[in-house]
Image (cartoon, helix red, strand yellow):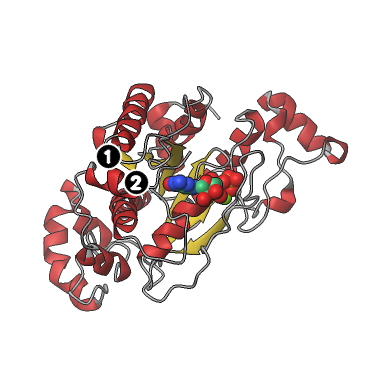
Amino acid sequence: MKSSKGSSSSSNNNNLNTSQTNSSIIQYLNTYQVGSHYRGDDDDGTVDDNDAALSSDWDDQTFGLGTSSSLHHRLASPPLSHLNILLVGEKGAGKSSLLSTFHRALHQNYGLMPVAGVGNTRTMSFTKKKKGYYLNTCHTIKGYDTRGLESLLGEEIEQVRAIRDGRARDDVEITQKPYSSWTLWDHLYSIMSRNPAAILDPDCLNGNAKGEASIGDVPHCVVFVVPANQRRIPAELEDFVNLFVEYGYQPLFAVTKIDCHGAEEGDLYAATHLYDCKKEELLNTFDLAFDKVKPIQNYTQWDKREVSVENLALDLLSRAVEIAESFVQNWEEKQLRGKSIWSSLREDLCVIQ
Ligand SMILES: Nc1nc2c(ncn2[C@@H]2O[C@H](COP(=O)(O)OP(=O)(O)OP(=O)(O)O)[C@@H](O)[C@H]2O)c(=O)[nH]1
Ligand SMILES: [Mg+2]
């Protein structure tokens, strides 16, 4: 049951200034250029010859020390045009609503409908495909909606792994290849890997060989979407979180539906209690830093503006951008040293796939 007081109660208790939309965060996100913080750009946010010349002497002296600005002027690859922020979670958790809430918070002249289709039932997943949406007005932050997790079993792990590795095509449902059409190689691979679920339908894959995806194809930050009003976090979710942690990601957790507490109308503290309980459960389950869990109350009515709703979403999105940026920076530094991030992470962690 939803409380009509949900909006005010949740916002009152999350220590955010909800009386005004945070215009500086909106401006920052809407003019954001990938890498502008670590490439040593001019104020115009571009990397030009002047930037490189200014830093070249400095680079020669400091390259051995590996300062990030010096490293980045030596990169051969062109700068990324946008960051990829991936949302993962169970069906009905509020992933599509969250993407649409992000989008709405960054657009003044929005339409009446959410940008990503929102479901109205929790019996089956509504979103079927991985699909990207530009969230900010200058198209430098792209949010990816995904199919809601239902079984949380091996097949879904393989599907999410393909997304993580940049192998899943956009706007296509990710499925396993039907057994009847397996090739000899599929049979061999399934025996060698002892994992029949790893045989994905080639129609949903983009042809990138495993481990060779480019930085533009992979997620740069993953946000796990967890509803506050769910009794317990399923133990299987840990396998999905580990998929990303073992590859160097620092997952964020969005606790949605903090307004669905079912308390008596007027109970201003009930929503916070619901969020606090879920946050504690997440911190204990995943051994997370305190600032990796954020409260979210998504828009459910799309025809009016709610500043408190937008402020929570903007707070999460700016954190996601920060994490994505450091992921990209890390990737580029590894690449500069002649290693793909996957191979170096495999060496570091001795992960056998
Ligand atoms: N009250 C409330 N309802 C929410 C919130 N977030 C999502 N909902 C509702 O929950 C239902 C499912 O939301 P979706 O955004 O479609 O969830 P999803 O995770 O994309 O679901 P699938 O696509 O099926 O995986 C919709 O009826 C939403 O309006 C929230 O923060 N508060
Ligand atoms: Mg959805």
Q: Three-letter amino acid code at disc 2? A: Lys
Answer with the quarter of the image where residue 153 lies. top right
* In the displayed structure image, the side of residue 200 where residue 273 appears, left or right: left
Q: Nearer the viewer, residue 164 or 112?
A: 112
Of the 4 image quadrants, the one containing the C terminus is: top right
Tell me the SS state at disc 2.
loop
* In the displayed structure image, the side of residue 41 where residue 208 appears, left or right: right
Q: Position of residue 129 (x, y in %)?
A: 63, 52
Residue 197 lies, with reference to residue 117, above or below; the image says above
Mark-to-mark CA distance, 1 and 2: 7 Å
Q: Position of residue 272 (x, y in %)?
A: 29, 36
Q: Nearer the viewer, residue 74 or 297?
A: 297
Q: Earlier in the sequence, mark 1 or mark 2?
A: 2
Q: Three-letter amino acid code at disc 1? A: Leu
**Is residue 212 visible to the viewer in this orientation of the structure?**
no
Q: Position of residue 81 (x, y in %)?
A: 40, 67
The yes-or-no answer for disc 1 within 8 Å of ligand 1 is no
Q: Please give the residue where the numbered disc 2 appears in the rendered image.
A: 5
Q: Please give the residue where the numbered disc 1 appears in the rendered image.
A: 268
Q: Residue at x 27, y 66 (%)?
A: 26
Q: Residue furthest right?
A: 180
The 10 Å Cα crowd at callout 1, few under 14, some 14 to 19, many 20 or more, is: some
Q: Are marks 1 and 2 in contact (CB under 8 Å)?
A: yes
Q: Residue at x 50, y 70 (%)?
A: 112
Q: Residue furthest front?
A: 265
Q: Residue at x 40, y 43 (%)?
A: 3
**Is residue 189 visible to the viewer in this orientation of the structure?**
yes
